[in-house]
């Protein structure tokens, strides 16, 4: 994880106060090193500032990295695609690949980025072509914002709404390029890029879009559109089930699909927990934590992570719960004749406690730190404005509900049980494993069941395709800005492009089967994986959005009229 800050101006006229503020907030993302590089190209001033959170390779490599007069700011991980050894720093390896390009033609550069399996955002100055390149991976897993006008361009991993600038997310729809001076070869590939906007009346910002391979062989998406084939006579008739029913018995073919998907997902988890620098000299402190509601997605990832970490090393399971006056007031009447429930017995806390016990049964040799992160209402309100700043430019009530849960969970301050006694505990694990991406691809949302109810298998395929298409411009940039504020990095095994590719190629009825009731039909394939891992209770867990599971939804307690899509106002 790194912070990127870049400016392009015709004169060195960047507002110093704004620049220093941006440097400060980007430094939180990369506490291990910070560095600035400034050059001038044809009267255009380019400033590069990078901060580094060292998570890959034996040694910390300060950025920006300079080689052969090329300059790279890299915020990403290369888990597969390019050949990189376990102890090699991927920033250095990527720079070596980029510096070997001996052509001004963009095809070679685009080919390198199209091979990368992993999340990224970057800025790269290519000396040979006098171009600036920048962009995000095709799923938008790392944040990059831009502030653009006719006089210049600012790029930053994060920003603040009060800095007097208007920031937007850089769309994760391709790789962008700016030609800094005349290039006779620039017209050769005009058909391959789309003009976006102009800087300084002469510098054209161009987009080379991510597309399916048959549409754009220069920058192909690493996964196809969904498999739309359906078996003959596949019924839409509902199957009667109840809460005590087991998962449907898989036949030999389905057993093989369960095995295949387990292997692909296991490989994605392995690559995301391997080669993380140890925190302490005796290698006993957890390096990996799981954002842990106790639900199906995160418990599968926790069980797979267990396979690839030393048994001497605990795994932190971060479970967050909030004191929410509105939710408490709503439940007060229901509890008048019942015993008062503890404030932090939220749905995710109850599920989390049950699920960690299941992990302890299948992996008793592992120390599982179930970190209970309890957030009083007053503390949540103390940090509210800070969290609003971090999620900017997103600014709705729902954004805040989700961002607040992620910010406190990733901070990792809570309690663990030691021999029946709760003791304060703070997780220092720098890598946080998240289950995000499972619902979109495996039918985890109620809208998938509704699509099947109204239009059968064909409508379900269309709805799932929409969800996969929307991943790149939903909320991953926001989540990256929130979590990295603590100098930590989220990793998403379900969004490994190898996993996405595998799932896109599978027929829809193998991934989900809405003929079965809730707790079975949605994410059926993942439920069967969980069952095969020995998670016989968690394999029936239902989907619950984080803002409801942790009770951050509508924290104000003031009005029920407040809706998730409403714009926020900051507290004074």
Image: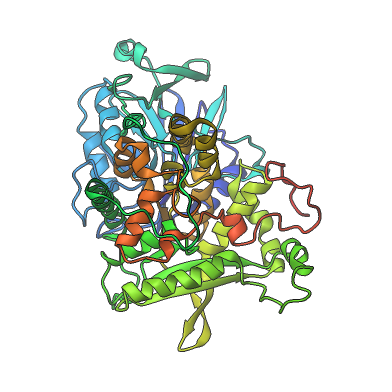
| Quadrant housing residue 495 | top left
Side (left or right) of 264 relative to 526: left
Residue 466 picture location, percent across and down: 48, 32
Which residue is drawn at the image coordinates 29% and 42% (left, top)?
Answer: 498
Residue 407 picture location, percent across and down: 56, 59
| Quadrant housing residue 232 | top left
How many numbered markers are drawn? 0
Describe the colour scheme in one phrase. Answer: rainbow
Q: In this view, does 334 lie above or below 477?
A: below
Residue 194 picture location, percent across and down: 43, 17
Side (left or right) of 144 relative to 314: right
Q: Is residue 20 above or below residue 6?
A: below
Which residue is drawn at the image coordinates 46% and 73% (left, top)?
Answer: 370
Side (left or right) of 477 relative to 441: right
Q: Nearer the viewer, residue 489 or 414?
A: 414
Evaluate whether residue 379 shows in this view.
Answer: yes
Q: Nearer the viewer, residue 201 or 453?
A: 453
Residue 461 picture location, percent across and down: 43, 32
Evaluate whether residue 285 shows in this view.
Answer: no
Which residue is drawn at the image coordinates 49% and 73% (left, top)?
Answer: 353
Query: In what quadrant of the picture does the C terminus appear?
Result: bottom right
């Amino acid at each position: 994880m790194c912070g990127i800050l870049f400016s392009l101006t015709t004169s060195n006229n960047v507002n110093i106060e704004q620049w220093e503020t941006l440097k400060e907030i980007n430094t939180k993302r990369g506490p291990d090193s910070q560095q600035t590089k400034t050059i001038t190209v044809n009267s255009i001033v380019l400033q590069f500032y990078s901060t580094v959170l060292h998570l890959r390779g034996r040694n910390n490599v300060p950025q920006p990295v300079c080689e052969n007069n090329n300059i790279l700011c890299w915020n990403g991980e290369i888990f597969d695609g390019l050949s990189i050894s376990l102890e090699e720093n991927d920033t250095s390896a990527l720079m070596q690949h980029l510096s070997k390009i001996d052509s001004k033609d963009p095809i070679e550069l685009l080919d390198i980025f199209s091979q990368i399996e992993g999340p990224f955002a970057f800025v790269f100055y290519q000396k040979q072509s006098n171009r600036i390149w920048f962009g995000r991976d095709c799923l938008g897993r790392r944040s990059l914002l831009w502030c653009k006008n006719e006089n210049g361009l600012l790029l930053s991993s994060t920003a603040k709404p009060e800095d007097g600038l208007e920031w937007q997310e850089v769309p994760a729809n391709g790789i962008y390029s700016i030609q800094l001076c005349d290039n006779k070869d620039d017209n050769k590939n005009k058909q391959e890029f789309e003009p976006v906007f102009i800087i300084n009346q002469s510098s054209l910002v161009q987009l080379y879009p991510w597309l399916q391979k048959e549409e754009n062989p220069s920058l192909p998406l690493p996964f196809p559109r969904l498999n739309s084939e359906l078996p003959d006579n596949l019924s839409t008739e509902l199957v009667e089930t109840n809460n005590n029913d087991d998962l449907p018995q898989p036949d030999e073919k389905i057993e093989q699909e369960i095995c295949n998907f387990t292997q692909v997902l296991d490989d994605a988890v392995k690559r995301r927990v391997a080669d993380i620098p140890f925190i302490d000299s005796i290698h006993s402190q957890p390096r990996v934590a799981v954002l842990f509601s106790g639900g199906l997605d995160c418990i599968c990832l926790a069980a797979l992570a267990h396979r690839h970490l030393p048994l001497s090393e605990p795994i932190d399971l971060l479970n967050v719960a909030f004191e929410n006056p509105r939710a408490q007031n709503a439940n007060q009447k229901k509890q008048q004749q019942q015993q008062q429930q503890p404030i932090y017995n939220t749905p995710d806390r109850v599920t989390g406690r049950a699920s960690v016990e299941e992990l302890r049964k299948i992996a008793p040799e592992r120390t599982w730190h179930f970190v209970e992160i309890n957030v009083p209402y007053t503390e949540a309100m103390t940090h509210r404005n800070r969290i609003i700043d971090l999620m900017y430019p997103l600014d709705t009530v729902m954004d805040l509900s989700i961002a607040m849960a992620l910010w406190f969970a990733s901070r990792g301050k809570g309690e663990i049980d030691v021999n029946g006694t709760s003791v304060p505990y703070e997780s220092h694990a720098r890598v946080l494993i998240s289950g995000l991406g499972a619902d979109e691809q495996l039918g985890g949302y109620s809208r998938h069941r509704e699509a099947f109810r109204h239009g059968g298998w064909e409508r379900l395929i269309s709805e799932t395709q929409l969800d996969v298409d929307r991943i790149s411009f939903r909320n991953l940039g926001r989540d990256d800005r929130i979590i990295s504020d603590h100098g930590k990095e989220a990793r998403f095994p379900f969004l490994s492009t190898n996993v996405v590719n595998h799932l896109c190629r599978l027929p829809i009825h193998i991934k989900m089967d809405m003929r079965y009731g809730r707790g079975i039909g949605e994410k059926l394939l993942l439920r069967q994986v969980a069952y095969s891992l020995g998670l016989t209770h968690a394999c029936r867990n239902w989907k619950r959005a984080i803002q409801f599971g942790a009770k951050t939804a509508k924290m104000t307690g003031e009005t029920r009229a407040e809706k998730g899509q409403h714009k926020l106002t900051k507290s004074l």
